[in-house]
Amino acid sequence: MLFLFLCIIINTLVFLWFVINIFLKSSNTYKDKGRNEMVEMGVVLGSGGHTYEMIQILKQIKNSNILFNFFYSHNDNLSKIKTENELVNYQKNFFVIPRCRNVGDSYSLSFIKFIFSFLYCIFLTYKMKNMKVIIVNGPGVCVPLVYSLIFRKYIFLKNIKIVYIESICRVYSLSLSAKLLYYFADFLPHNINLLNLKIITYIFFKVRRKKLAS
């Protein structure tokens, strides 16, 4: 009986917490924000060609009111150097993320590292309240970061857009990162062979829902 009573109390508190969060979120939605207000965009850098591809994408963005938050693995300082050299005139910050898996690591060790990295990313991004969008293109280091933002999005009801642009080197199949994340993100596959029925259905209904909402 006591256990049932505690469950009811906990469920009631959780429900009230969600209602309050929704109310606060909706009340802030209609605040008029100036067009010149600085906005933050998250970007994940990865070793190999991921950083090069991402730099080419970001060069198409000419808005000077964007502050870029770059995330990179703790043992991938080369990506930071490349980005600093290529995007000289961009406003940017750099943040280090613990790597989930090294070559030769077992699955159990990789899982432990993933949990640690996931929790680290939750605390790292907690104060980035103005970061409304994050762009990733498939490096393994993006997975715990994106999951931490998904947690923030659905548990704390924060408004953030997750954009996944599949690496151009993926010709015949999606990367493991894409398979882990594509239920939660918008995708831009570079090859038509990657657009299987499941992804087409997902994109169609998501776009249709946006049009109905607008």
Image: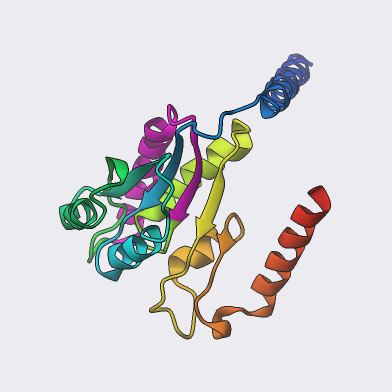
Nearest to the observer: residue 168 or residue 76: 168
* Location of residue 49 in the rendering, given as x and y in whole percent from the top left corner: 28, 70
Residue shown at 46% from the left, 69% from the top: 166
Instruction: State the image quarter where residue 64 is shown.
Output: top left
Instruction: State the image quarter where residue 7 is shown.
Output: top right
Left or right relative to 86: residue 138: right
Q: Is residue 10 magenta?
A: no
Q: Residue furthest right?
A: 212
Residue shown at 42% from the left, 63% from the top: 137
Q: Which residues are magenta?
A: 106-135
* Location of residue 107 in the rendering, given as x and y in whole percent from the top left corner: 35, 60
Residue shown at 74% from the left, 14% from the top: 2
Nearest to the observer: residue 49 or residue 8: 49
Left or right relative to 96: residue 19: right
Residue shown at 32% from the left, 47% from the top: 71
Nearest to the observer: residue 108 or residue 88: 88
* Location of residue 186 in the rendering, given as x and y in whole percent from the top left corner: 59, 59
Looking at the image, how many numbered discs can be counted on the residues? 0
On screen, 211 above or below 125? below
Nearest to the observer: residue 98 or residue 130: 130
On screen, 106 above or below 162? below
On screen, 54 above or below 149? below
* Location of residue 99 in the rendering, given as x and y in whole percent from the top left corner: 28, 51
**Which color scheme is applied?**
rainbow
Magenta residues, dominant SS class: helix
The quadrant in which the N terminus is found is: top right
Q: Is residue 129 magenta?
A: yes
